[in-house]
Image: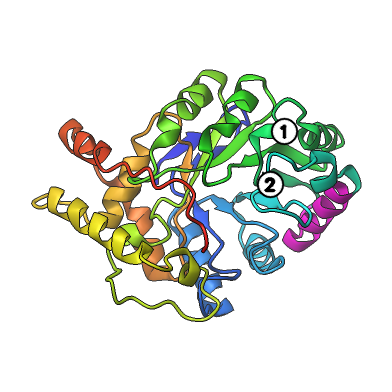
Amino acid sequence: MKYRQLGKTGFSVSEIGFGAWAIGAHWGEQSEKDSLEALGAAVDAGVNFVDTAAAYGDGKSEQIIGKIMKERSERIYVSTKTPPLDGPYPPSPYCDPEVRYPEEYLRTNVEERCRMLGVEAVDILLLHSWTRAWNDNPYPLEVLRRLKQEGKILYAGISTPEHDQNCAVDLIRDGWVDVVEVVFNIFEQEPAAQLLPAAVKHKVGIINRVVFDEGSLTGKFTEKTEFGEGDFRREYFSGDRLSRTVKRVEALKKDLIGYEMSLPQTAIKFSLQQEGISTVIPGMRNAWQVKANTAVSDLPDMADDVIEKLHAHMWRKAFWYFG
């Protein structure tokens, strides 16, 4: 496993981290036994960075991570997220930051994150979504600064809304964030325009989520794939979205004929070769997935001509969450 600096935090984190959404909720059935085995296998493979959130099973994911942290002697860095209070999600331009993320709520929620994880202070606390309308009045980030000064959290930032990755650029340039979590993958490459270069210049850590495009870039889906009750992809890939996605994945596979890496390996390595990305956090639900994903760290970099082919598969699908 290779390691990278997470911005100016001083944390040396595994370039492949553990995305812990699926071990909490919303991805179909998942046993705690499998989750603990997956986390244990990840730590054995050198993974020392885990990403989670309050919303991943109302703290369930955090509690499972807390168990592993108690069992292991290795230093495990954890990034978790606080959601906004009830309202449009992602927040709309008309939302008041002091209503969606009031100080009392943030303080209470951070205390809850500590309890769920079983820690005295949160390594990294991210606001779970944002709107660029708040960039000129980043009140919630002011609160997080105070919580840093008080030792409740060590570092702070935001997780970007899917439809506006570059909303964090001004926050990075103005010094409001230590870490930003973004969507970046073979289809979603927009952060390469401004966000990643800004992160490099200002030494802000970048957590890369959705590296597999919610599973499509594993190459496992067909137009007949069905998602069970409780799996958020049932709506995410609703209507004609699954068939459109499968067609694009098949076109991608044709461009990679003869290439030695599998599609999932290619997806991870593509992100790892982007300057500015600190760690990639594929979701891993069992020990087999952990072994397959973490092995990518030891694979050689892709040649420039392969990277150029992948650039051509950028898909400006914009915001197509539900409906």
Q: Which mark is residue 91?
A: 2
Residue nearest the viewer, comparing 36 with 158 = 158
Coordinates of residue 304 in the picture (x, y in percent):
19, 31
Label 1: state its secondary structure: helix
| Residue projecting furthest to the left | 258
Q: Which mark is residue 237?
A: none
Tell me if residue 65 is in the magenta stretch.
no
Q: Which mark is residue 134?
A: 1
The earlier-in-sequence mark between 2 and 1 is 2
Magenta segment: 105-119
The main secondary structure of the magenta stretch is helix
Residue 53, by quadrant, is bottom right
In the image, is 102 to the left or to the right of 205?
right
Residue 237, by quadrant, is bottom left
* Amino acid type indicated by mark 2: Pro
Tell me if residue 113 is in the magenta stretch.
yes
Whether tag 2 and tag 1 are in contact, CB under 8 A, the answer is: yes
State the residue at coordinates (68%, 46%): 91
Q: Is residue 284 visible?
A: yes
Coordinates of residue 208 in the picture (x, y in percent):
48, 44
State the residue at coordinates (30%, 46%): 298
Residue nearest the viewer, comparing 13 with 181 = 181
Coordinates of residue 17 in the picture (x, y in percent):
49, 50
Marks 2 and 1, how far apart at CA: 10 Å
* Amino acid type indicated by mark 1: Trp
Residue nearest the viewer, comparing 307 with 247 = 247
